[in-house]
Image (cartoon, helix red, strand yellow):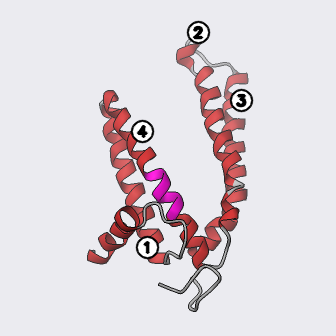
Amino acid sequence: MNDFFKQIKIVLLKKPFDFSGRASKKEYWSFWFFTQLTSLILLIVSLRAKPLVIFFIIYILILLIPSLAVTVRRLHDVNKSSLWLIGFGPFVLIAYMSIFLLSLIAPGNQTSAQMDIFQILLIMTYIFGIFATALWYCFPIFMFLVQEGDQEENRFGPNE
């Protein structure tokens, strides 16, 4: 457990803006688990008390740069360029735009409380499209993140 918090300390306090070098598999996945767990807790709390949503948004924004930095360093550990992440940007934009469009056709914004079949199909198409596209793109990235890092020095530096 002590090693778990040591890995999180490295990402958040020692290297939050460091996009060079390498990050071990343990460092990356410890930080990922920590961010998912804390985000879930904050999301549940903020959904119960609506004014606290701003804290959840601020928390996500604070973790954005360290998350990108540790992901880039993890890719470097398996001798992959951070350019692999550039393709992810349009998918994130599409996901946020889809959520915005879905909010426009939400039942609360409609004159009638019932959704028609067209709205249901539109929502299902968006959800399936986002999921399929993200899965198709993210699978290679996921495979890089779970594989063992290079044991010896690579073009991104020595094994730490």
Residue 137: say if magenta: no
- Element type at marker 1? helix
**Can you identify the residue that label 2 sits on?**
112
- Amino acid type at image mark 2: Ser
State left or right for residue 89 relative to residue 24. Answer: right
**Can you identify the residue that label 4 sits on?**
57
- Amino acid type at image mark 3: Leu
Residue at image coords 72%, 36%: 125
Q: Quadrant of residue 3?
A: bottom left
- Amino acid type at image mark 1: Glu
**Highlighted range, magenta:** 63-69
Measure the C-alpha gap from mark 1 to mark 4.
24 Å
Measure the C-alpha gap from mark 2 to mark 1.
50 Å
- Element type at marker 2? loop
**Can you identify the residue that label 1 sits on?**
27
Q: 10 Å neighbourhood of mark 4: few (<14), some, or many (≥20)?
A: some
- Element type at marker 4? helix
Which badge, 1 or 4, is on the more N-terminal residue?
1
Which secondary structure is most common in the magenta stretch?
A: helix
Measure the C-alpha gap from mark 4 to mark 2.
31 Å
Which badge, 2 or 1, is on the more N-terminal residue?
1
Which mark is on residue 122? 3
Q: 10 Å neighbourhood of mark 1: few (<14), some, or many (≥20)?
A: many
| 101 or 9, nearer to the observer | 9
Q: Position of residue 56 (x, y in %)?
A: 38, 40
Q: Are marks 1 and 4 in contact (CB under 8 Å)?
A: no
Q: Are marks 2 and 1 in contact (CB under 8 Å)?
A: no
Measure the C-alpha gap from mark 3 to mark 4.
27 Å
